[in-house]
Image: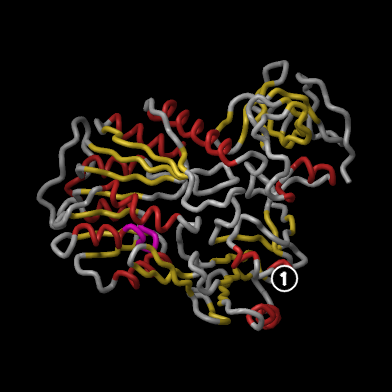
Amino acid sequence: MIPSRPPVPAGSTESAGSAEPVELELRLGPVAHGGHTVARTGEGRVVFVRHGLPGELVRVRLTDSGPAARFWRGDVVAVLEADPHRRAEHVWAPADPLLTWRRGEPPVGGAEFGHAELPAQRALKAAVVTEQLSRLAGLETRVTVEAMPGEDPQGRGWRTRAHFAVDPAGRIGMHPHRSAAVVPVDSFPLVVPAIDGLRLGRLDLRGAERVDVAAPADGGTPLVHLSLAPGADRERLRHELARLTAERDVSVTARAEGQRRPETWAGRPSVVEHAGPHRWEVSAEGFWQIHRAAPGLLHGAVPAAAGARPGEHALDLYAGAGLFTAALADAVGETGTVLAVEGSPVTSADARRTLAGRPGVRVERGSVDKVLARTWPEAAPARGRRRPARGGAVPRPDVVVLDPPRAGAGRAVVDRLVALAPRRIAYLACDPATLARDLGRFRRAGWHVREVRAFDMYPNTHHVETLAVLEP
């Protein structure tokens, strides 16, 4: 066990690299993007603190410090003056630093807001989105984070996907913040019961580097996928997983690095998902919205925000398995078209399989910026004034939906869309900072942000989903 020590006075410059942990007593300031609050030592040094609430007086254990560091990082290990919205009990003990650091262990990630009541979590997220839009996009707007339909009062049981590391003993686990260490876990209260009920923590998964689990929100057959380490004993793992499949209806797939397709060890290589009137088969390594209520909510909200009309041409970028593509195809009808672009070979194949029978729908695999450049070469961004693209072999889009990864769309894609000049863009983002950066670029090109909505699709974490609607 790491020895404890009394609090170090605020303003101390003692390094956390010493033999004993360094702790500071700090008054926490405002929330910051990334799940932190911002505090300052008496000397003015910035400390990014996790597991606190603005205004609290706390004792912080430094996890990243030193005289040369631009700023320090730390975890709350004791609360001296609590915010009234702090929970009496954390939603998940392994993620509670007040408990784990008593054992000399860091908390796992995955529930870094689990110490706060849900309304307080949503207020923090709204403050972050508002600040990022103001600072990076120059957009002054009030944002409210909406609760998801049918949310559990504690924000549990919403994840239909979970990703676990595997420790040297073969136990599933999760990583602490900014760490490659693996902390074994027996359960994860944020997942849907169908995943927690698999009890994967009792299996010996030596030879697997990662375990991905998916369970359809409607109670369909869950799927366990193993990413195999080099030299993994497949037969031993097959035998171990047979303990699972003998007890319940569950599919199992596995793939080694460099192997083109996963092997199906039990059941089928995909899970069946539904949204609206549509049905998808999503592969083990494919993308699908994680919150159990998100596909149904977003399937309606995002295409409605884009406002596609019958006979129009729609563009669905970073399309995933085609959740929005299907709804856009319904909106434009048989006289319209939808082009869906997705970079993942696995996920684009899922979209092709689902949408194969839809007239006017085309799914193209590739980098979004390259597909845009190849499809509409006449719409290359020009210096100075932007002009609408005209005269190409493929009709320019009237409406665009994009749902990029955490890194955002980026300059090349934003500039291409500005040059294409659709009448409306619906931009769904899982990172408010990259969304704000991209919205700033659109605004500098003369676009107007018509609406911003935010959804609490990741309760008990700092993550938030944001939908922005833009018009030229």
Is 211 located above or below residue 93 in the figure? below
Q: Is residue 320 magenta?
A: yes
Frontmost residue, 294 versus 385 = 294
Residue 291 in the image: above or below residue 127: below
Residue under numbered circle 1: 206
Q: Residue at x 67, y 27 (%)?
A: 47
For numbered disc 1, what is the local secondary structure? loop
Q: Which residues are magenta?
A: 319-324
Query: What's the residue at 44%, 35% (across, down)?
Result: 144
The residue sitting at 68% across, 39% down in the picture is 87
The reply to whether residue 171 is in sight is: yes
Residue 244 colored magenta?
Answer: no
Q: Majority secondary structure of the magenta segment? A: loop
Residue 459: percent from left, percent from top: 56, 47
Q: Badge 1 local density, few (<14 within 10 Å), some, or many (20+)?
A: many
Residue sticking out furthest to the left: 391
Q: Is residue 374 left or right of residue 367?
A: left
Residue at 65 percent across and 24 percent down: it is 55
Residue 410 spot, x, y in % from top left: 38, 42
Q: Position of residue 149 (x, y in %)?
A: 46, 51
State whether residue 364 is above or below residue 381. Answer: below
